[in-house]
Amino acid sequence: MHLVPVSIESIRTGQPLPFPLMDKDGTLLARKGFVVPSRKELEEFSLRGGGLFIDVADSEAHHRAYVDQLHGLVRAEKSLGEIANTQIT
């Protein structure tokens, strides 16, 4: 398993995860399909695990989820500054 870091901003809360989230050692923090209820809980996962990581095999699902998030921001008519601040690593 090869882990790659993901930014908190690229993960949607209140919707099922399209990939499992792991800590830096590969320990499962949240399974695929888990609904992270709030940004605060996501931040707690990140702090507990030394960051948020996914298996490189799941990176395509992460990318699709990120693009979907960007499309959601455009549909919600968010400012270009808000959209530009949405990051992926």
Image: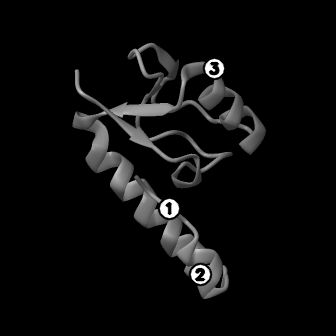
Please say whether residue 38 is visible from this viewpoint: no
Q: Splitting the image into 4 quarters, where does residue 53 fall?
A: top left
The secondary structure type at the circle numbered 2 is helix
Q: Earlier in the sequence, mark 3 or mark 2?
A: 3
Residue 60: image tag:
none
Circle 2 sits on which residue? 75
Residue 48: image tag:
3
Q: Tag 1: residue type?
A: Gln
Q: Tag 2: residue type?
A: Arg
Q: Tag 3: residue type?
A: Arg
Q: Residue at x 43, y 55 (%)?
A: 65
Q: Position of residue 68 (x, y in %)?
A: 46, 64
Q: Splitting the image into 4 quarters, where does residue 45 fall?
A: top right
Q: Residue at x 34, y 55 (%)?
A: 63
Q: Position of residue 12 (x, y in %)?
A: 59, 50
Q: Residue at x 73, y 32 (%)?
A: 41
Position of residue 3 in the picture relative to residue 76 (left or right): left
Say above or below: 34 vs 85. above
Say above or below: 14 vs 48. below
Mark 3 to mark 1 CA distance (whole Å): 21 Å
Mark 1 to mark 2 CA distance (whole Å): 18 Å
Mark 3 to mark 2 CA distance (whole Å): 34 Å
Please say whether residue 20 is visible from this viewpoint: yes
Position of residue 17 in the picture relative to residue 57 (left or right): right
Circle 1 sits on which residue? 87
Between residue 44 and residue 11, name the one nearer to us. Answer: 44
Mark 1 vs 2: CB contact within 8 A: no
The secondary structure type at the circle numbered 1 is loop
